[in-house]
Amino acid sequence: MSEPLSEALAEALRPLVTQLVRDEVKRAGFEWGWRTAEQAAEILGVTPAAVRQRVQAGQLPGRKEYGRIYVDLRAFDEQLRAGGRATVGANPKRDRGDV
């Protein structure tokens, strides 16, 4: 396939693929926002205990309501996009040499 043709094909497919992804995300019910510690842990690839510890330490945006920890994944995602340091899968004390 020639380069101009493949570029034209990619450009033509882009809106369709974008809409398909949006539809699939909507169908799956996935939405960034407030999640339980267990849900956030699964998404972030850490344990629920690690999520709770990081919320309490202020490393993850969250709150405690009715005895449960909730994490604001939308705020966390925005923090990462703005260049904030992700500490979810790391030990920040160890990374700084404090341990």
Image (spheres, rainbow, N blue to C red):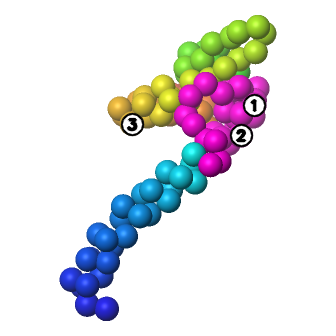
Pointers 2 and 1 in contact (C-beta within 8 Å): yes
The residue tagged 2 is 42
Residue that appears at 71% across and 40% down: 42
- Let me know if residue 5 appears in the view: yes
Q: What element does badge 1 sit on?
A: helix
In the image, which disc is placed on residue 15?
none
Q: What element does badge 2 sit on?
A: helix
Residue neighbourhood size for the residue with mark 3, other residues' Cα within 10 Å, grouped as few (<14), some (14–19), many (≥20): few
Spot occupied by residue 38 in the image (x, y as percentages of width and height): 75, 31
The residue tagged 1 is 38
* Nearest the eye: 52 or 10: 10
Residue that appears at 76% across and 8% down: 66
Spot occupied by residue 65 in the image (x, y as percentages of width and height): 71, 9
Residue neighbourhood size for the residue with mark 1, other residues' Cα within 10 Å, grouped as few (<14), some (14–19), many (≥20): some
The residue tagged 3 is 81
Q: What element does badge 3 sit on?
A: helix
**Region of the chain picked out in magenta, as a range:** 27-51
First-in-chain label (2 vs 3)? 2
